[in-house]
Image (tube, rainbow, N blue to C red):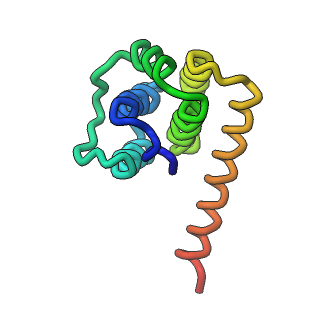
Amino acid sequence: MYLNKLSEEQKNLFLDLCIHAAMANNVLADEEKELIDRYCAEMDITSPRYSAETSVEDVRARLAEISSGSEKRIIALEVAALMLADNEHDESEKSFMRELIQSLGITDDEYDKILDFVGKIIGLYSEINGFVFNRN
């Protein structure tokens, strides 16, 4: 939704971050792959990839270094949405997000808001899909 606000470097780092996030539980779910594809389209990345080019530690460090507060919140919001795309949020994914928000300097209160927003978005999309596809 806001990924087009990122620089080219941030977009490529964000893609690597998404790949690492999706693989946090060692499973690249179809829903996660689909969302990565949508993120790439939003960022004008014409060739989506599912293999990271940069280590997660280097990605987090560089994003923390070059991103403003709003860009960091965009990154955390979109990664949280990816992590919840398959309707599962296991301990490995929670750990990944804790490390990410800590490295980006996002507070626990901000992260709680992010999770709340993502939950609302997912719920609204579910309602809309129910209306569009199941209405007689």
- Quarter occupied by residue 29: top left
At x 37%, y 28%, the residue is 13
Q: Horizontal placement of 44 versus 109: left or right? A: left
Quarter placement of the C terminus: bottom right
How many circles with numbers are drawn on the protein?
0
> Which percent across, then down, holds residue 59?
41, 19
> Which percent across, then down, holds residue 101?
61, 22
At x 43%, y 18%, the residue is 62
At x 55%, y 26%, the residue is 93
- Asked whether 26 or 54 is in front, the reply is 54
Q: Horizontal placement of 37 versus 135: left or right? A: left
At x 51%, y 19%, the residue is 64
- Asked whether 48 or 10 is in front, the reply is 10
> Which percent across, then down, holds residue 10?
40, 31
**Residue most extreme to the right:** 109
Residue 101 visible within the image: yes
99 to 126, vertically: above or below: above
> Which percent across, then down, holds residue 120?
69, 52
**Residue most extreme to the bottom:** 136
Residue 91 visible within the image: no
